Amino acid sequence: MINHTSRDVITTRGLTLGYAGKPIVANISIQISKGEFIGILGPNGSGKSTFLKAVLGLIKPLSGDIRVLGEAPAHGSSDLGYMPQMRQYASAANLSCRSMLEASYQGTSFGLPLPSRKKSGEIGRLLRLVKADDYADRPVQQLSGGERQRIYLAQSLLGNPKILLLDEPLSNLDPHYQETFINLLKDIQDRLDITILFTAHDPNPLLKVMDRVMFFAKGKAAIGQTHEVITSPSLSALYGTSIEVIEFNNRLFVFGDGQNVLGQVAHHHD
């Protein structure tokens, strides 16, 4: 049995994850507390998104144990909000932002749909929370990438989740929009006192906001403070080869064999 305290929202012991019986990441033992901002880093295919899927109850462990809010993960739990990496715009292209949120709303009261007035009020509150009320009635397809991300953030907050999982939300944003989104997200976390799991390639946008970092590589994961995990000795042990961490202009660069081991991420201007 996992030792679970009242502050722990996610606990794992010897957790091994993968597909078709083939492990991707093995032996994860962690405790994540209420209100933490956890940055999840690592190269493509290292297990970042797979870990989120396990928390969401979308996949079962190959071995080991995981508990979310003291229970086995349950697919569709209202306690979890999820902002996935890839979005299909076609179905929502002609909808306004407000209409898309209304279509996504699953709130119920004693098994009955919530009154439209309450639904409208809740959606209005979320639009204000993500600072998107100025363009709430514009079609989703007319928004910039940064504006769209705010709407998808509001969508993930429907139902007042206790844990928010975001999969690569910065990947198509230029540095200005990245910083704006991170600052907004941190403000929302402080207001709502929620736990955040945030996957990314680049640690730098998260350095000022994350409490701890999970770093996935070579079938393993390390978790701790940034200054404990993103170091040459720690990452060299994780990768099993020489890794160099360089700090320059308050930014971290991680290199192995002369290349950025986290991969180069292109930024698209909005």
Image (cartoon, rainbow, N blue to C red):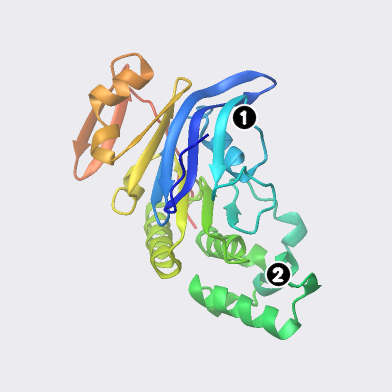
Answer left or right for 239 relative to 172.
left
Given residues 186 and 268, the one toward you in this image is: 186
Q: Residue at x 57, y 76 (%)?
A: 135
Q: CA distance from mark 2 to mark 1?
A: 30 Å
Which residue position holds label 1?
A: 61
Residue 191, by quadrant, is: bottom left
Q: Is residue 41 visible?
A: no
Q: Residue at x 62, y 24 (%)?
A: 62
Which residue position holds label 2?
A: 107
Mark 1: few/some/many CA within 10 Å (<14, 14-19, 20+): some
Rendered location of residue 202, percent (x, y): 38, 40
Q: Residue at x 44, y 53 (%)?
A: 6
**Amino acid under label 1?**
Pro
Rendered location of residue 219, percent (x, y): 48, 21
Residue 18, by quadrant, is: top right
Q: Secondary structure at mark 1?
A: loop
Q: Is residue 4 visible?
A: yes
Given residues 90 and 261, the one toward you in this image is: 261
Given residues 228 and 262, the one toward you in this image is: 228
Q: Secondary structure at mark 2?
A: loop
Rendered location of residue 261, percent (x, y): 38, 26
